[in-house]
Image (cartoon, grey):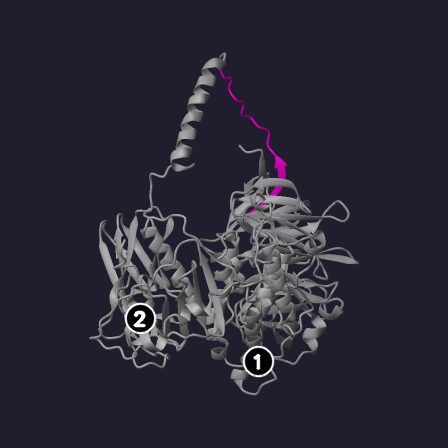
């Protein structure tokens, strides 16, 4: 027997397989009896309304026949029951019952009966309102400061607040930005309605603002317009709590102060009536219902919170004062005075378990038996401890903390890229502007070891590369099955992708139900998007890559983009992308440098990336392990800022989304982040995550999102003083007037990274790492290019691939095939 249990005073089970929710329970003196005792009113989704007045002969008794005052079938599901002054001309309490399409107001009365039959109770319908919209919940109060009566506000499923002044309908207003209904409450002190929207923020609307807004039902003439129109309301204040809310409640300390309590999925909030947070409490369990009420200590609030662990917690502000075990999971909790017993806690479960309980303790009758003690041999314990420590140490050395006997071999995934183009191109809806856009076939093979159901394969490539199919589903009903799927990849639009790497991701669940994800990366051939082109002497933009090894013939690195000549030391090569960009690659004969140049700076990136990867593969094949390359130029922020200004101008001028998908912006953001991450030997690993900050140039909302992200970095891990850490960031993202602040923050970010800043807050990264970003750029002398006449050798070096046909010989996929050792 547990010591901390909710002491059962009276309980019963309602109906058979009926369902209940948080609005189905109410405690009030609904029959206006002279003794002022509360009655328990319960409505169910099956349409039954029940009223109880418990009178147990002794603690723990179940319900007797005389405890049930009234049971009636209303034939419509009961969503919520409330008791208030809902009838004009009287201040007596009446019962409001909310159905999905109807609001009914009843009077409950009892008459003295015969001795053996007891008192008789009945309900009388005072009036009802048929609703034009499906109801969700309701609240009531003295809206607008009326005296001696309560008005009712109903929230519909489509976001309309319908206000009823007792027997008459007043007005209806639509909530702005509505998606899903949330909890609704009324604050009499501020005369406001409070709800939690689907944007996960608490919103407050003044009653006067609702009352003077344009009537939603009279603004349009047609019935269709009548159901979906209305003036957007202006919110009084909002507070983002970051999670959905289960319930909301307003409690007043006194006439001068009140508090708004919000029960979230993982947190419990107490707000001032102006939206400021008074306090909050993080919950370690999943709550199901709550009820704030005034505390015996002045200035504090007690709160009952039920959870899905069958527990009832009592908090005084944020301090846990008591915890009691319940026999069920409560979906509604109330506190009232029953049978002259004050402070009775009434809980209701979703399956109809109704219980009245109080807090207390039971004496523990269990006594632990005496354990026979024996004298310890400490020498033997020391020997045993050393043996165990040795076993743990050996395991950690060999396979880590956890044993690795279970490997990721439930499913094997392999990808093969065809060495040749498709005989018939699979490219459709292309916008490249060439006679023929080639496609290449990719095959993905899956082999299972155990039974797997609904394994899903998703394939990703960088735009504007396109797949003929990117989603596949498999059923592995028996072990050791092999499934192979094929699809084609082609260039769809006329700009260069940021990379040629693709990714095949398979998600599945193991037989034990554990979800797993396995991926396999593959690389597409450069010839898919690029042809041999004419090299150029001059270009507007150039970058130089320094290496620590002798230069390699470009013919060995790019065998499919030049013809074999007598001199196999080819040191100049041209590339012509299908989208129109032209790039020239040069290898110095006298130094360990390579130069990439083009008329557009963003066109340089893909050839630069291919050069670095192929150089690494070449020297790995040669057995060289210390190969390294570096970039000695400054970060081209000015060119990047020009792209930002162009993108921002398009947004301001209201251009179409297609214009925002600027090929220059998409390509340049890849250059920006990879020049930082790849070409600096001492660049810290977190710099690779700059992609998340500088990515998305082609998306609407980019400027304000990136500015907020960079500002957060500058005030956290890259801050230089406590003053910067104290800066407050705006929670609302709005379109800026210009890009000056964004460019300033980007420059400051790069400057602090260059001085040793790290994009992490871990302790091992506390010491700054020295980095140097020189401002100069050493170029390859033009004489190296002029040593050979481009016009003279172009016929020997390059093959014309302007018109591709099915019979045209295709170069091999692997750029390193045929390279001599």
Residue reaching furthest to the left: 807
Specify few, some or many for label 1: CA neighbours under 10 Å numbering under 14, 14-19, or 20 or more: some
The tag on residue 605 is none
Front position in the image: 740 or 135: 740
Tell me if 819 is positioned left or right of 674 in this view.
left
Tell me if 805 is positioned left or right of 386 in this view.
left
**Horizontal and vertical percent position of residue 163:** 64, 72
Front position in the image: 502 or 526: 526
According to the picture, the residue beneath numbered tag 2 turns out to be 468
Magenta part, dominant SS: loop
Q: Secondary structure at mark 1?
A: loop
According to the picture, the residue beneath numbered tag 1 turns out to be 229
Region rendered in magenta:
355-373
* Residue found 51% across the figure and 46% down from its top: 328
Q: Secondary structure at mark 2?
A: loop
Whether 781 is drawn above or below 658: the answer is above
Marks 1 and 2 close (CB-CB < 8 Å)? no
Give the mark, 1 or 2, whose residue is nearer the N terminus.
1
Whether residue 597 is visible, yes or no, is yes
Front position in the image: 161 or 560: 560
Number of numbered discs visible in the structure rendering: 2
Residue reaching furthest to the bottom: 221
Q: Is 694 included in the stretch rendered in magenta?
A: no
Q: Is 364 included in the stretch rendered in magenta?
A: yes
Whether 160 is drawn above or below 40: the answer is below
**Horizontal and vertical percent position of residue 556:** 31, 61
């Amino acid at each position: 027997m547990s010591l901390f249990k909710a002491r059962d005073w009276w309980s019963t089970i309602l109906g058979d397989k009926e369902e209940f929710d948080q609005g189905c329970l109410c405690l009030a003196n609904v029959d206006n009896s002279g003794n002022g005792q509360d009655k328990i009113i319960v409505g169910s989704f099956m349409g039954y309304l029940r009223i109880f007045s418990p009178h147990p002969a002794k603690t723990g008794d179940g319900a007797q026949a005389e405890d049930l005052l009234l049971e009636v079938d209303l034939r419509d599901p009961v969503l919520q029951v409330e008791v208030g002054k809902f009838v004009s001309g009287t201040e007596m309490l009446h019962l409001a019952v909310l159905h999905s399409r109807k609001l009914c107001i009843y009077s409950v009365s009892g008459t003295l009966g015969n001795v053996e039959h007891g008192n008789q109770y009945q309900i009388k319908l005072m009036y009802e309102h048929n609703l034009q919209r499906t109801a969700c919940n309701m609240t009531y109060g003295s809206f607008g400061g009326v005296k001696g009566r309560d008005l009712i506000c109903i929230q519909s499923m489509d976001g309309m607040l319908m206000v009823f002044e007792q027997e008459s309908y007043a007005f209806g207003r639509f909530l702005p930005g509505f998606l899903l209904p949330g909890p609704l409450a009324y604050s009499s002190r501020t005369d406001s309605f409070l709800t939690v929207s689907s944007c996960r923020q608490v919103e407050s609307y003044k009653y006067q603002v609702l009352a003077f807004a344009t009537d939603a039902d009279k603004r349009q003439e047609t019935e269709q317009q009548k159901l979906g129109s209305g003036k957007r309301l202006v919110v009084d204040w909002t507070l983002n709590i970051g999670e959905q809310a289960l319930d909301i409640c307003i409690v007043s300390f006194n006439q001068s102060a009140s508090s708004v309590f919000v029960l979230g999925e993982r947190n419990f909030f107490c707000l001032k009536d102006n939206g400021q947070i008074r306090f909050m409490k993080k919950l370690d369990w999943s709550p199901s219902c709550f009820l704030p009420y005034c505390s015996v200590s002045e200035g504090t609030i007690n709160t009952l919170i039920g959870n899905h662990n069958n527990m009832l917690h009592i908090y005084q502000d944020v301090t846990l004062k008591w915890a009691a075990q319940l026999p069920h999971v409560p979906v509604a909790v109330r506190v009232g005075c029953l049978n002259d017993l004050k402070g009775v806690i009434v809980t209701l479960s979703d399956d109809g378990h109704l219980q009245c309980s109080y807090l207390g303790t039971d004496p523990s009758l269990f006594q632990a038996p005496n354990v026979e003690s024996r004298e310890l041999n400490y020498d033997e314990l020391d020997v045993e401890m050393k043996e165990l420590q040795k076993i743990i140490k050996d395991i950690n050395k060999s396979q880590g903390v956890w044993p690795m006997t279970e490997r990721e071999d439930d499913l094997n995934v392999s990808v093969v890229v065809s060495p040749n183009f498709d005989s018939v191109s699979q490219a459709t809806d292309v916008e490249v502007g060439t006679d023929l856009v080639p496609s290449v076939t990719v095959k993905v093979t899956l082999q299972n070891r155990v039974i797997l159901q609904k394994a899903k394969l998703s394939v990703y490539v960088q735009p504007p590369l396109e797949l003929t199919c990117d989603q596949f589903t498999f059923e592995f009903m028996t072990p050791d099955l092999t499934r192979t799927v094929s699809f084609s990849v082609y260039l769809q639009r006329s700009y260069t992708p940021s990379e040629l790497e693709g990714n095949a991701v398979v998600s599945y669940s193991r037989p034990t139900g554990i979800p797993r994800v396995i991926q396999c990366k593959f690389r597409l051939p450069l010839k898919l998007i690029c042809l041999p082109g004419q090299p150029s002497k001059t270009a507007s933009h150039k970058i130089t890559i320094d290496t620590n090894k002798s230069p390699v013939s470009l013919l060995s690195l790019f065998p499919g983009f030049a013809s074999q000549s007598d001199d196999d030391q080819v040191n100049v090569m041209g590339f012509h992308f299908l989208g129109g960009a032209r790039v020239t690659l040069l290898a110095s004969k006298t130094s360990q440098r390579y130069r990439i140049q083009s008329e557009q700076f963003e066109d340089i990136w893909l050839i630069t990336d291919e050069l670095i990867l192929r150089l690494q593969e070449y020297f790995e094949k040669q057995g060289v392990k210390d190969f390294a390359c570096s970039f000695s130029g400054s970060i081209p922020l000015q060119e990047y800022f020009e792209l930002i200004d162009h993108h921002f101008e398009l947004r301001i001028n209201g251009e179409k989304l297609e214009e925002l998908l600027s090929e220059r912006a998409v390509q340049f953001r890849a250059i920006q982040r990879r020049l930082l991450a790849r070409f600096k030997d001492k660049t810290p690993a977190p710099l690779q995550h700059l992609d998340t900050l500088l990515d998305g140039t082609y998306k609407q909302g980019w400027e304000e999102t990136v500015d907020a992200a960079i500002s957060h970095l500058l005030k956290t891990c890259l801050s230089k003083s406590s003053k910067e850490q104290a800066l407050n960031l705006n929670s609302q993202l709005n379109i800026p007037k210009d890009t000056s602040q964004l460019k300033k923050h980007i420059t400051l970010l790069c400057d602090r990274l260059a001085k040793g800043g790290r994009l992490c807050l871990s302790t091992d990264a506390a010491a700054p790492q020295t980095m140097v970003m020189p401002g100069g750029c050493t170029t390859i002398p033009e004489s190296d290019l002029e040593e050979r006449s481009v016009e003279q050798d172009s016929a020997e070096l390059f093959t014309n691939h302007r018109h591709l046909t099915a019979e045209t010989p295709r170069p091999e996929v692997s750029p390193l095939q045929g390279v001599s050792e």
